[in-house]
Amino acid sequence: MAFILLLLTACTKVGEQPTSKGPVKELPLAEYRDTTILDMYEGSRLSWVLKTKYLVKWPRTEMVRARPVNLIVYDSLGKVLVRVTSDSGAVDEGISFLVASGHVHGHSEKGVDITSDSLRWNKAINQISTEARVRVISEDGDILTGKGFISDAKLDNWQILSDVKGVFQKVEERFQHADQDSAAPARPVPSADTAASKSIGTGAPATSQVPIAPSARRPDSAAPTAPKAGTP
C-alpha cells in the first residue's frame, strides 16, 4: 500500500502543463480512470482491500479519493469481517482513517447491516462512527433507526446515539426466554437500556415497533458492569 501511495504522490502528471499566459488549471498529481485495487497490509497481514473505478490524488492534500468504494476488511486470520460500499470515499496517505460517503452500506459476516449517508473508520481507536442518520438491522432481524452511530470495526458492539426507534422481532418469544433466564443462576445480563427494549411487549404480537431510550446499544449486548436484572 505504501508503494502504491508513493506512486500516487510522486510518479505521474496527467497531461502537459498549458503554455498560454491565461489562468492555469490545477492538475491532479495522479489520476486513474479504470478499475484500481489497493491492498493495505499490516506487516505481512492483509488488512483491507479497496476496489474502485476512479482514483485521484490532488496537490496540497493528503487525501486519496475514490469513486465508487467497494471495501473488504479482513481479520488477523484472513477472514472477511466487514464489507462496505458507497458512492465515494477518501483515505489519507498514512491510512489512519477512511471516509465513505453517499449511499453507504456496511455488512458484517455475523449478519449486521448498516446504511447511512456517511461513515468514518478511525484506525487508531479501531472505531466506526457517523453523526448522520443510520438504519441498522441486527443479526436477529431487529431494525433500529436513529441519528449518530459508534461501533467497533467488526460491528460487534454498536450504539445508536439519539432519536432511536426500533422494530423488534419475536418479542413474545424473547420475553419468555428472559423469564427463564431470570430464574437461572446469576450471569452477566444486558444493560439497562437494552433490558428495557427486551421487556417491551408482554403479550404483544411477534413484531413490535416502539420508540426506545435516547441511546441504544446492540440488542443482546452485555454491559461489563451491569447488575443482574430481575423479572421484566
Image (tube, grey):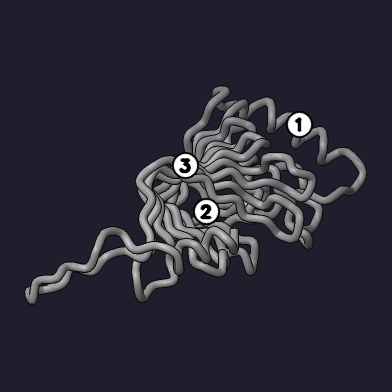
The location of residue 80, given as percent across then percent down, is 67, 40
Helix, strand or loop at label 2? It is strand
Vertical placement of residue 61 versus 228, above or below? below
* Mark 1 or mark 3, whichever is nearer to me: 3
Image quarter of the C terminus: top right
Q: Nearer the viewer, residue 71 or 143?
A: 71
Report, in whole angstroms, how far the alpha carbon at label 2 lies from the one at label 1. Answer: 25 Å
Instruction: Give the distance between the C-alpha atoms of the residues marked 2 and 3, in whole angstroms.
Output: 20 Å
- Secondary structure beneath label 1: helix
Q: Residue at x 50, y 34 (%)?
A: 167
Residue to which mark 2 is pinned:
160
Res 5 seen here: yes
**Quadrant in the picture for residue 175:** top right
The amino acid sitting under disc 2 is: Ile
Q: Amino acid at mark 3?
A: Thr
| 157 with respect to 211 (left or right) | right
Q: Residues within 10 Å of mark 1 (few under 14, many from 20)?
A: few
Give the quarter of the image for residue 197. Answer: top right
Quadrant holding the N terminus: bottom right
169 with respect to 227 (left or right): left
Near mark 2 (Cα within 10 A), the count class, few <14, some 14-19 or many ≥20, is many
Residue at the spot 67% in from the left edge and 36% down from the top edge: 110
Rendered residue at 36%/65% (across/down): 29
Of circles 2 and 1, which is in front? 2
Which residue carries the number 1 mark?
177
